[in-house]
Image (cartoon, rainbow, N blue to C red):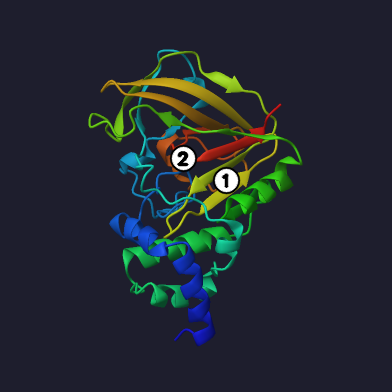
């Protein structure tokens, strides 16, 4: 049982952010945003992933970056009007965010331990609590302030700029999650030495998993035309140094190759963020 003080803390915090509304969204799709490259509910990078999952159609090779390239790509759609936003720091800090406190939070939200929502929350917390690789800096953010502070801790005290994928006519009925796209223009490289990529995680309110590798990534802006007439201004990231990656990483199963000899590129969903220095 959660202690009375813990319940009081949660009650005021969750009431303040109207988490019931977030919970309703979460209940409808607890596995939302499981399509990112290595770190979401299906734990990409482990053998738990179904290789036939269409959401894996986000990976490509660096030599695919040319005008006229055609490939099937999966772009998830999240209605902006129902997508949880990052909390203010005061609100986020008032809610315990750790695996040790998960049973109390599940009890408060009336979620069964074996429910899809509970499993999603557990995997998100475990991902956020993993130790970073030797070549990587990572953190999880539940507020914009904490995201900015941690990003500046990696990139330095510089003016920041964001890169995001933009899906035109996002809620158009003709838009399908997976369709064949054509590279309409020569991909435009965003020349930066360092970057931090932040991916949405499955949780009742907005949580971002962010990671960066200094000097070993390339970012591209790519104009895409879909077979159904949809247009996407996509952001893609190429990881040039994969020497520390797990040989069983799903990207190698999709693309072939092995750590250290095979760069891995992938498209970012529309609700992901890449932070770069503005100059």
Residue 203 placement (x, y as % from top left):
43, 59
Q: Which residue lies at the image location 47% right of the left edge and 36% below the top edge?
A: 268
Residue identifier under label 2: 251
Please state if 171 lies on the left or on the right of 36 as rendered: left
On the image, which quarter does residue 197 sit in? top right
In this rendered view, identify the residue nearer to me: 259 or 98.
98
Comes first in the chain, label 1 or label 2? 1
Left or right: residue 108 versus residue 39 is left
Q: Is residue 124 above or below residue 172?
A: below
User: Which x, y percent locates residue 251?
Assistant: 46, 40
Viewer-nearest residue: 20 or 165: 20
Is label 1 in a helix, a strand or a loop?
A: loop
Task: Specify few, some or many for label 1: CA neighbours under 10 Å numbering under 14, 14-19, or 20 or more.
Answer: some
The residue wearing badge 1 is 245
Above or below, 63 against 88 in this view is above
- The residues bearing labels 1 and 2 have C-alpha atoms spaced at a distance of 10 Å
Task: Give 200 or 93, whichever is nearer the viewer.
Answer: 93
Left or right: residue 93 compared with residue 59: right
Callout 2: SS: helix
Q: Are marks 1 and 2 in contact (CB under 8 Å)?
A: yes
Q: Residue at x 50, y 13 (%)?
A: 186
Label ID, residue 225: none
Q: Nearer the viewer, residue 150 or 128?
A: 150
Quadrant in the picture for residue 131: bottom right
Vertical arrangement, residue 199 with respect to residue 206, above or below: above
Q: Quadrant of residue 111?
A: bottom left
* Residue 70 shows in the view: yes
Taking the spot 76% from the left edge, 41% from the top edge, the residue there is 157
Q: Position of residue 226 (x, y in %)?
A: 32, 22
Quadrant of the image for the N terminus? bottom left
């Amino acid at each position: 049982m959660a202690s009375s003080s813990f319940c009081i803390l949660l009650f005021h915090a969750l009431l303040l952010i109207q988490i019931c509304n977030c919970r309703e969204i979460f209940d409808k799709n607890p596995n939302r945003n499981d399509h990112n490259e290595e770190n979401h509910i299906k734990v990409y990078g482990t053998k738990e992933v179904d290789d036939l999952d269409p959401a894996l159609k986000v990976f490509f090779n660096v030599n695919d970056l040319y005008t006229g390239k055609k490939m099937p790509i999966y772009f998830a759609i999240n209605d902006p009007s129902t997508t949880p936003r990052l909390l203010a720091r005061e609100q986020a800090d008032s809610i315990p965010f750790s695996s040790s406190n998960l049973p109390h939070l599940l009890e408060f939200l009336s979620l069964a331990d074996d429910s899809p929502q509970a499993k999603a929350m557990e995997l998100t917390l475990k991902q956020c609590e993993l130790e970073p690789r030797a070549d990587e800096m990572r953190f999880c953010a539940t507020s914009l302030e904490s995201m900015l502070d941690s990003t500046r801790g990696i990139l330095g005290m510089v003016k920041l700029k964001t890169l995001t994928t933009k899906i035109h006519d996002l809620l158009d009925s003709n838009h399908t999650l997976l369709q064949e796209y054509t590279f309409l223009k020569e991909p435009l490289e965003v020349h930066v030495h360092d970057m931090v990529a932040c991916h949405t995680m499955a949780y009742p309110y907005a949580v971002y998993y962010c990671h960066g590798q200094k000097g070993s990534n390339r970012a591209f802006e790519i104009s895409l035309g879909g077979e159904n007439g949809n247009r996407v201004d996509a952001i893609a990231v190429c990881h040039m140094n994969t020497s520390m990656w797990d040989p069983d990483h799903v990207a190698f199963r999709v693309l072939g190759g092995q750590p250290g000899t095979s760069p891995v590129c992938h498209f970012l969903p529309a609700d992901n963020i890449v932070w770069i220095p503005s100059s």
